[in-house]
Image (tube, grey):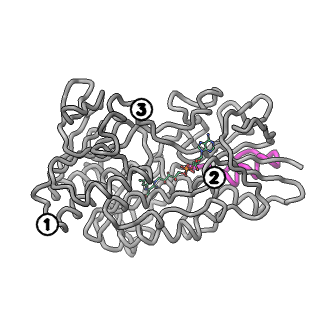
Amino acid sequence: MKRILILGAGTAGTIMANKLRKSLDREDWEITIIDREKIHYYQPGLLFIPFGIYNKNDVIKPKSDFIPAGVNLIFQEISRIDATDNRVLLGNGKSLEYDFLVIATGAHLEPSETPGMLDKLWHKEIFDFYTLEGALALNEYFRDWPGGKLVMAITEMPFKCPVAPIEFVCLAEAFFTRKGMREKVDISLVTPLAGAFTKPVATRMLSDLLEEKNIHIVPDFYIEHIDNDNKKLVSYDEKEVPFDVLTIIPMNKGADFIGTCGLGDDMNFVPVNKNTLQHEEHKNIFAIGDGAALPTSKAGSVAHFSAEILFENIMSAIENRPLTAHFDGHSNCYIETGYGKGALIDFNYDTEPLPGTFPLPGIGPFGLLKNTKINHYGKLMFRWIYWHILLKGKQLPIEAEMSMAGKRVVNY
Ligand SMILES: Cc1cc2nc3c(=O)[nH]c(=O)nc-3n(C[C@H](O)[C@H](O)[C@H](O)COP(=O)(O)OP(=O)(O)OC[C@H]3O[C@@H](n4cnc5c(N)ncnc54)[C@H](O)[C@@H]3O)c2cc1C
């Protein structure tokens, strides 16, 4: 009996467990998946909680509902990988051996890395919305906030779902307009980037959109500390941004045990070949999802597309064949923009988000870098697709590889 261990039963690990179990003979292959948490969070849904669009029950389900029969599910802390002995150590002192290891332990928040973030205002006037607790606390706070300076700040790159802060400020703008108090709320997006997004064409479209909504962008701002007494962000070059309420994306890091066992980079993300997803040093170790150090977005869509490639490559590795499936960095993200509309971006390692239609040229129905109602419905539909199709490793009618069909090449 040979063994595959999957570390992390989030988006990527769950998809891999489903795909591998369907194809590998149960007599020959034992598959085990390990996670410390029993609840699966639909993380894209956290964005909607501060504004009362979703509640807690819309974003949580038991992890066990999505792990197929024939896969051992263990709820335990993962403490260490011993890559020379092909062994993983768990928090309860037990160890598990593997023939192949899939690391899918994602990215988590490290608010303690920024001085002042966890001081007296944390979850009182400084909030994150990347955790259920943070999103719920913000929902409570917004109920009777009289208005003032609302600052949405990004601490550091990379972080999961790079469009989420843009969506947050757009939804906040619509929320306070609906409450009849928009003129009392000054909204800013503070970012270490030079603009609203990482790539020029999308940055241009998104910056124009924010300007139309009277949302200010404060670019090139690297937060050094948060001054709780005077309620302001202070940058390394001593610029300051005052706030009444601050929503923040704390530093994102890979799992601590990745760092301590020497398999990660300085942010504890796992360096893998960006096309095959195989670890640079240990050929029976692969990494997928937010926990992998890949030069594309940390996004559920990336986990989903790359799972198809990783599945093929693991099947090849098992049969001692060369790894011929290549991940191109494909990412596809709906961007909620408020008032029942949304935008969509589709890109990969080499092609930045471009305008056009998706998935069908000229037909769509979704518009790339366009603010449309149908894109908003795409985003809402995605939750159902996530729970019922994506996590279960079923096929979606979208190719893992990015297509240029429907895209219009433009330069700014
Ligand atoms: C607010 C928000 C909005 C988002 N919106 C979108 C969107 O619109 N579109 C999109 O494509 N993506 C979006 N994302 C990103 C998407 O949710 C993630 O990219 C995706 O879930 C990553 O999957 P993963 O499997 O790599 O990590 P996760 O799903 O986070 O899973 C990692 C798992 O590893 C476990 N784990 C970690 N360390 C240990 C340990 N030491 N021991 C045991 N278990 C451990 C964790 O408990 C977790 O279950 C959003 C994310 C957020 C936070």
**Mark 3 crowd level (few <14, some 14–19, many ≥20, 10 Å Cα):** few
Mark 2 residue type: Ala
Residue at 29% in and 71% down: 340
Q: How far apart are marks 3 and 2 (CA)?
A: 25 Å
Is residue 24 visible in this depiction of the protein?
yes
User: Which residue occupies the extreme left position in the image?
Assistant: 183
Q: Residue 351: percent from the left, percent from the top?
A: 42, 50
The disc placed on residue 368 is none
Q: Residue 384: percent from the left, percent from the top? A: 51, 71
Q: In this view, does 145 lie to the left or right of 401?
A: left
**Rendered view: 26 above or below 178:** above
SS for callout 2: loop
- Give residue 106's quadrant in the image: top right
Labelled pair 3, 2 in contact (Cβ < 8 Å): no
Q: Which mark is residue 180?
A: 1
* Mark number, residue 9: 2
Which residue shows up at 30% across the image and 43% down it?
Answer: 126
Q: Distance between the residues labelled 1 and 2?
A: 42 Å
Mark 3 sits on what residue?
A: 112
Residue span colored magenta: 310-327
Residue labelled 2 has its Cβ within 8 Å of some atom of ligand 1 = yes
**Is 81 on the left or on the right of 303, as rendered?**
right
How far apart in space, not on screen, are marks 1 and 3 (Cα)?
A: 36 Å
Amino acid at circle 1: Gly
Foreground label between 3 and 2: 3
Looking at the image, which residue sits at the far top?
Answer: 237
Instruction: Specify whether 33 is left or right of 388.
Output: right
